Image (cartoon, rainbow, N blue to C red):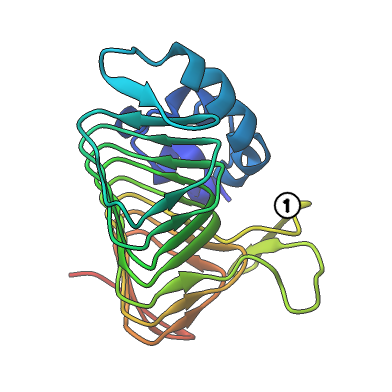
């Protein structure tokens, strides 16, 4: 379970949400507090660098938001982020510095660290994506189990109950997710790991490894 902790997944200096995450042992413990954190942090953002748009939406002046994109509050779009054509941000979303939210990508209750890319037809809900994490076209986080029971994080012989009904995926820094993959509820992927395209992933993928198929994980050489 040590490998699932915030300190082993993320570089906390690479997000505006440092104050929230550094108080948590496991990252999913922050999911229920993202909305309130945004509402409080937004009030303190410097007006020379951020502008408030609509109700509880703060957008950095250096960010690029396409006219066709939708941003629902509360949300913070950090500096030099890009919100592209027809992106749909439903609310309770933090988009980090230099991050890309692309065409027809949907976000809900998420933290995207700096330089994250979710650029093509992605769904990311109730999830946290670490520094420079990238999701290939069509890859998604599935955030509710089909039987609607509470999510349990599993890895090998270890398991941890989260008490959460909605929990997508925790992606560590520099994770690469292949196109059209599904990250099932409670997935945790360690730093520097990669997932092959068209994969269905559940449980824990160790850092610096490659997920080829269920039961087929190899260390990166």
Q: Residue at x 69, y 68 (%)?
A: 144
Instruction: Report which quarter residue 50 is drawn in.
Output: top left
Q: Residue at x 43, y 31 (%)?
A: 53
Instruction: Report which quarter residue 176 is drawn in.
Output: bottom left
Q: Residue at x 55, y 31 (%)?
A: 55
Left or right of 127 on screen, residue 179: left
Above or below, 122 relative to 11? below
Left or right of 46 on screen, residue 37: right
Above or below, 106 relative to 38? below
Above or below, 156 relative to 62? below
As helix, strand or loop, the secondary structure at mark 1 comes to loop
- Whole-percent x, y for residue 117 in the image: 28, 57
Instruction: Report which quarter residue 137 is drawn in.
Output: bottom left
Q: Mark 1 points at which residue?
A: 162
Question: For this rendering, which residue is in front, 102 or 69?
Answer: 69
- Whole-percent x, y for residue 62 in the image: 20, 31
């Amino acid at each position: 379970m040590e490998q699932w902790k915030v300190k082993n997944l993320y570089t906390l200096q690479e997000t505006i949400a440092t104050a929230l995450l550094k108080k948590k042992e496991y990252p999913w413990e922050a999911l229920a507090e993202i909305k309130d954190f945004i509402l409080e942090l937004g009030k303190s953002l410097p007006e020379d660098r951020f502008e408030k748009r609509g109700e509880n939406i703060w957008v950095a002046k250096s960010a690029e938001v396409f006219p066709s994109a939708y941003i629902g509050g509360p949300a913070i779009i950090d500096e030099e982020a890009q919100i592209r054509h027809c992106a749909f941000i439903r609310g309770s979303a933090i988009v980090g510095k230099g991050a890309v939210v692309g065409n027809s990508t949907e976000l809900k209750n998420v933290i995207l660290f700096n330089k994250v890319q979710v650029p093509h037809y992605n769904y990311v809900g109730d999830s946290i994506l670490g520094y420079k994490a990238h999701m290939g076209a069509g890859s998604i986080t599935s955030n509710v189990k089909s039987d609607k029971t509470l999510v349990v994080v599993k890895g090998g012989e270890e398991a941890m109950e989260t008490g959460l009904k909605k929990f997508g995926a925790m992606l560590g820094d520099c994770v690469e997710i292949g196109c059209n993959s599904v990250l099932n509820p409670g997935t945790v992927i360690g730093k520097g790991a990669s997932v092959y395209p068209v994969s269905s992933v559940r449980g824990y993928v160790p850092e610096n490894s490659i997920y080829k198929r269920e039961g087929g994980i190899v260390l990166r050489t």
